[in-house]
Image (cartoon, rainbow, N blue to C red):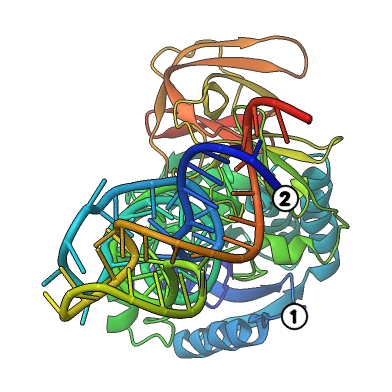
Amino acid sequence: MSKNVFVGMSGGVDSSVTAALLVKQGYNVTGVYMKNWSKDLPGHHCPWKEDYQDAKRVAVQLGIKFKMYDFEKEYRHKVVQYMIDEYETGRTPNPDIMCNQEVKFKLFLDTAIEEGADFIATGHYSRVENGKLLIGIDKNKDQSYFLYRVKKSALDKTILPIGNYEKPEIRKMAKSMGLVTAEKKDSQGICFVGQVGIKEFLSQYVKTSPGRIIDQHGNDIGEHEGALYYTIGQRQGLGVGGGLPYYVVGKDMKKNEVYVSSDLQDKRLWSKELKLSNMHWIGDKPTDFKGMSVRTRYRAKLIPLESVSQKNNKTWQLSLRDDVRAVTSGQSAVIYDGELVLGGGIVV
RNA sequence: UGGGAAGUCGUCUAGUGGUAGGACACCGGGUUUUGGUCCCGGCAACAGGGGUUCGAGUCCCUUCUUCCCAG
């Protein structure tokens, strides 16, 4: 009796090939389109219907069962609301990490299991081996960063088939199998919501007012549209020109002020020490961090850790070997031991 | 409105007689399952009016505007 696998199919190439590989491997595969967002936003059409149809077409091509799970309500609560709340307090959240934690590897998993699945699968470029999360073979596409908050119990039920391949191979396989999504452009932007600018998205849900932009000398150099829209390291969107580019180096939500600097060496732009909260370890809490490293954003290079210490129940402190640019509160720092993802936390 | 200085793309600025270049911003594209970064391309100016000159952003006159020092 072959095992039942429910594959999250987004209508993109990666999840299409994921499903195809599982079929080849002899699993009894069911494709599932998760409908997490369907609302159009000003100037942007939500592509959920097209994506759904692409996923469905691939399912038909592969001859697998196909269904849709409607998680809109939960996604709105667990992901979108979280995102809005974080921005309102001045942080810069990573909604896709929350989406994986709460929706794909919890809600989807639970629902699938309830409906008879033995495993779930997704099109992430990462690997699961013996309940451990590893980076993808394609180091350039490795998406383990987005998965560090997934529980071990969920990983035990998870298959990530394309983590063993390089992206170009996936494209090639899709083409040779004649999948309709073979040439489809990779999706970007907030998971499910589409390539809506974050500002346009947030502006639908929060109210903001203009405030001052202050440079490194304390000069008022312009007006912004609301401090919450800006994030550390940001250059575009300030509307302030002249000479060198300005980067956001800080903000004060109470005063509604955004601080910028045209000095790339500005201390506020670089961090060697990170304070993390909401730590999550996939396996046991590590006791020794020798030789381990940390990643502070997707696709960024790993920085060796000098030391890691737990300050109290909530806070951990990491010392890095090198300075990292634009570490931002609300973003995630993920700790790696070579290819192994140990866990991580949210930057305070 | 007394004296001085200055007015070049939205902004900062190069260019002191031969038909205006760069940077930033902005717009578009590329990279990217977060924000952001980064890469490529594009848009765009000589404050107005007179002169001198074969030819003026560059010299002269004038108007306007701004800044500084004096009030």
What chain is tagged by disc 2?
Answer: A
In the image, what residue occupies the spot 69% across and 43% down? A92
User: Image quadrant of residue B30?
Assistant: bottom left
Helix, strand or loop under label 2? strand
Helix, strand or loop under label 1? loop
Of the residues under marks 1 and 2, which one precedes in the sequence? 1
- What's the residue type where badge 1 is placed? Asp
> Residue A47: percent from the left, percent from the top?
63, 82
User: Image quadrant of residue A9?
Assistant: bottom right
The answer to which of B13 and A336 lies nearer the viewer is B13
* Image depth: mark 1 or mark 2 in front: 2
B34 w.r.t. B48: above or below? above
**Is residue A304 shown to the viewer in this render?**
yes
> Residue A10: percent from the left, percent from the top?
57, 73
A219 w.r.t. A41: above or below? above
Please tell me the numbered disc located at residue A223. Answer: 2
The answer to which of A221 and A269 lies nearer the viewer is A221
In the image, what residue occupies the spot 83% across and 45% down? A88
In the image, what residue occupies the spot 45% across and 32% down? A264
A296 w.r.t. A159: above or below? above
Residue denoted by label 1: A40
The answer to which of A11 and A321 lies nearer the viewer is A321
Pointer 2 local density, CA inside 10 Å: few below 14, some 14–19, many at least 20: some
- Say whether residue A139 is left or right of residue A238: left
- Say whether residue A153 is left or right of residue A129: right
What chain is tagged by disc 1?
Answer: A
- What's the residue type where badge 2 is placed? Glu
Q: What is the distance, in whole Å, between disc 1 and disc 2 at their CAs?
A: 29 Å
> Residue A130: percent from the left, percent from the top?
48, 39
Whether residues under marks 1 and 2 lie with C-beta atoms below 8 angstroms apart, the answer is no
> Residue A301: percent from the left, percent from the top?
38, 36
